[in-house]
Amino acid sequence: MGSAMTDRPACKISPSILSSDFARLAEESQRMLACGADWLHVDVMDGHFVPNLTLGAPIVKSLRKNLPDAFLDCHLMVSNPKQWVPDFAKAGASLYSFHLECLMDDGSSEDQAKEVDSLIDLIKESGMKVGIAIKPKTPAEWVLRFLPKLDMVLVLTVEPGFGGQKFMQDVVGKCAVVRAASKDVDIQVDGGLSPSTIDAAAAVGANVIVAGSAIFGSDKPQDVIGALRKSVEDHAAKQ
Ligand SMILES: O=C(CO)[C@H](O)[C@H](O)COP(=O)(O)O
Ligand SMILES: [Fe+2]
């Protein structure tokens, strides 16, 4: 659904719980929602697709139990995204974003595109929203053929694997390519977003903003969330 004054889909701020105190996950998540967060970003890493291990479906299940109404925005940095669809659906994930690179190393391969299509269908049939994530070196053009079936495109603005990395400004232009092809799809940016980097992403059509270290590292997370939202809404109003 678009925001009141623009055609662009509504702004959503999605704090990455990767930067929270994992021993107090439910409280930290509640705190973010109370500070104005729209979604909670859940970074799932398998130690294979990326050189780090985080959490899996059992933690999502616990979060869902504690936060029955929260939108759990799950970013799957795993080598075999198909394997985890049933577990995450059962656990209560709201959105399942998988990496295109797991299934595609050639943007013109029809066989690879069929695999991607069938994974999209599986995720939707399981009752979750679906997103495709792309690493910094993956061309935005590769996702365009899938847009009619997608809820979201996730543009990584760091190499995936760790929080607290530097925002890669040269990558963010990919949002403009996706936004030119769809007014309606959610475009998420993830990695190194803060009040000082947000304008570059908001200016090219991003409307779902992930931030981990900038929000959890602040003693006024509500101000950081407010500043991110203001930038997105101001740029959307100019379109
Ligand atoms: O997907 C991710 C890393 O792979 C994280 O969501 C991302 O890095 C958020 O953390 P920060 O805002 O600190 O960069
Ligand atoms: Fe992420």
Image: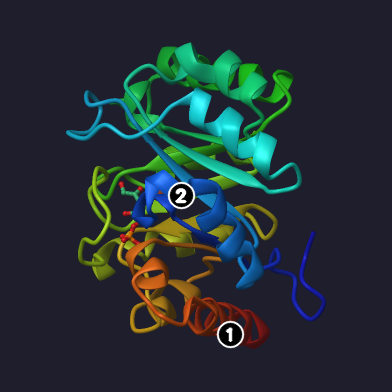
Estimate the x, y position of residue 111 in percent, counting from the top left.
43, 12
Q: Quadrant of residue 180?
A: bottom right
Residue found at x 51% / y 24%: 58
Left/right of residue 22 with respect to residue 58 in the rendered view: left
Tell me if I can see residue 37 in this picture.
yes
Nearest to N terminus: mark 1 or mark 2:
2
Residue at disc 2, secondary structure: helix
Labelled pair 1, 2 in contact (Cβ < 8 Å): no
129 over 154 or under it: above or below: above
Left/right of residue 151 with respect to residue 180 in the rendered view: right
Residue at disc 1, secondary structure: helix
Q: Quadrant of residue 6?
A: bottom right
Estimate the x, y position of residue 9 in percent, counting from the top left.
70, 63
Quarter of the rendering occupied by the N terminus:
bottom right
What is the number of the mark on residue 230? 1
Disc 1 to disc 2, C-alpha distance: 29 Å
Residue at image mark 2: 24
Residue found at x 77% / y 65%: 2
Quarter of the rendering occupied by the C terminus:
bottom right
User: Which amino acid is tagged 1?
Assistant: Lys
Q: Nearer the viewer, residue 116 or 76?
A: 76
Q: Quadrant of residue 100?
A: top left
What is the number of the mark on residue 34? none
Left/right of residue 59 with respect to residue 172 in the rendered view: right
Q: Nearer the viewer, residue 2 or 213?
A: 213
Estimate the x, y position of residue 49 in percent, counting from the top left.
25, 27
